[in-house]
Amino acid sequence: MLKTQVAIIGGGPSGVLLALLLAQEGIAVTVLERASRVHVLARIRAGVLESTTVDLLHRAGVGERLGLEGKLHRGTGIAWGHEQTYLIDSYAATQRYFTTYGQTAIQEDLYAAAEARGLTIHFDVSDIEIDGLTDNPRIRCQIGQHTHTLACDFVAGCDGFHGISRQAIPNDILKTFERTYPFGWMGVLSETKPLDDIWYVHHADGFALASMRNPKLSRYYVQCPADDRLEDWSDDRFWETLLRRFPSHLAAQIETGPSIEKSIAPLRSFVAEPMRYGALFLVGDAAHIVPPTGAKGLNLACSDVYYLWRGLTQWYQEKDPHWLDAYSPTALTRVWKTVRFSWWLTNLLHCYPDQTPFDLKTQESELASITESPAGRQWFAEQYAGYPIEDWG
Ligand code: RFL
Ligand code: PHB
């Protein structure tokens, strides 16, 4: 029988970041990842990091490349009605920058650090079963040709929305809350020079977004019907749609080129409560999903990691369960604030298929309530830049 102190299911960003932080405290960890390393590194996802996420990556000792290559931003742009543009200076309102740096690069940095520090990450693990969460935690799984049993004190469920750890919470205890949206995001990565800022665009035909990964790599998205297929989106159709939705002076600055990755993501809000059952703690997308409009998913996963790291460290070092017991309610308070902001920003910036002229007018006046008043800009900036963590220490 294999043994560890904390078994971590899922070797995505939250699983490996948690593993590195716990290992720094002398806590034994084992990470079980279903996919191959190559597969995990091929996923193109988040790009915008709150300052607390950047701090946490530094604390885990994986901030070096991020510090050199990440781009600091003072604020973000919102474009509306084809010509109106607003740059909301979130730095002025919060004294916090945010950073563009790709999730793929973070994942590379995390794997490199894990390897350098001799942490065990098993890839291609299948048939994971979790047992004994209320008395004697055990994980059974298939690694290569062999079936293993892993005994542990705690299980961290870091296995994303489609993982299995959430299902280990009995149905009469688990409550879920969900909203789906009648549209998705068609995303393109291209080796072209990005715009200087991130731009969120409201257009009568649908939302569009300009973002970046590095000075030579751009990431763009356009709103599309939820059931669109990737084959329907040639590069030409994508660029034509994007440029039409952007105000002309910004469209004129957008460099187009062949896509090097394309994907369609559905939009969803989802929360599972509680985030703890016995020895199991759900972390990141395993417990909650937000639509990407506020760029919050990875940031929320990282704040969960912080709360769990704090709880497990206090437990192992002082045998005090205070922060571990506080994990689920504390994380959920932050989750719901962020779920609300991401839902609100999605509603503000997208066109719904059944939208009426009345809805458009109220969207317009909602935007004005932010851009035309210092209090409105402050309110938006605090949420976009991300709430500080109460006892960041
Ligand atoms: P992940 O990244 O899904 O990783 C979970 C890992 O668990 C593995 N796994 C299993 N392992 C073992 N056994 C099983 N049964 C397993 N089932 C699954 C998976 O293979 C995977 O490796 O969850 P995690 O670590 O919680 O991280 C969450 C973030 O990845 C996610 O929230 C963000 O990518 C969301 N997101 C964004 N977040 C931001 O903060 N800023 C952004 O700018 C941003 N942009 C985005 C996004 C997500 C997007 N998509 C594709 C949904 C843009 C997009 C388009
Ligand atoms: C991204 O760079 O992929 C990105 C940026 C901002 C968002 C979502 C995604 O709101």
Image (tube, grey):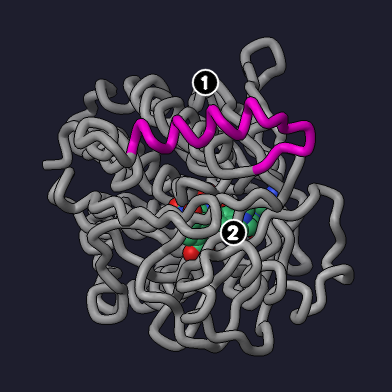
Quadrant containing the C terminus is top left
Amino acid type, residue under disc 1 in the picture = Pro
Residue drawn at x 60%, y 73% is: 37
Spatial CA span between label 2 and label 1: 35 Å
Relative vertical location of residue 64 with respect to residue 168 in this rendering, above or below: below
Q: Let me know if residue 122 appears in the view.
A: no
Which residue is disc 2 drawn over?
Answer: 208
Q: Report if residue 290 lies within the magenta region.
A: no
Judge by depth and name the residue closer to the eye, 176 or 29.
176
Amino acid type, residue under disc 2 in the picture = Ala
Mark 2 close to ligand 2, CB under 8 Å: no
Q: Residues within 10 Å of mark 2 (few under 14, many from 20)?
A: many
User: Does the residue at mark 2 contact the one at mark 1 (Cβ under 8 Å)?
Assistant: no
| Ligand 1 rendered quadrant | bottom right
Residue 282 shown left or right of residue 114 in the figure:
right
Judge by depth and name the residue closer to the eye, 252 or 387.
252
Q: Report if residue 352 lies within the magenta region.
A: yes
Residue drawn at x 86%, y 61% is: 229
> In the picture, residue 323 is in which quadrant?
top left
Nearer to us of marks 2 and 1 is 2
Q: Position of residue 261 (x, y in %)?
A: 67, 78
Q: Secondary structure at mark 1?
A: loop
Q: Let me know if residue 154 appears in the view.
A: yes
Which residue is disc 1 drawn over?
Answer: 274
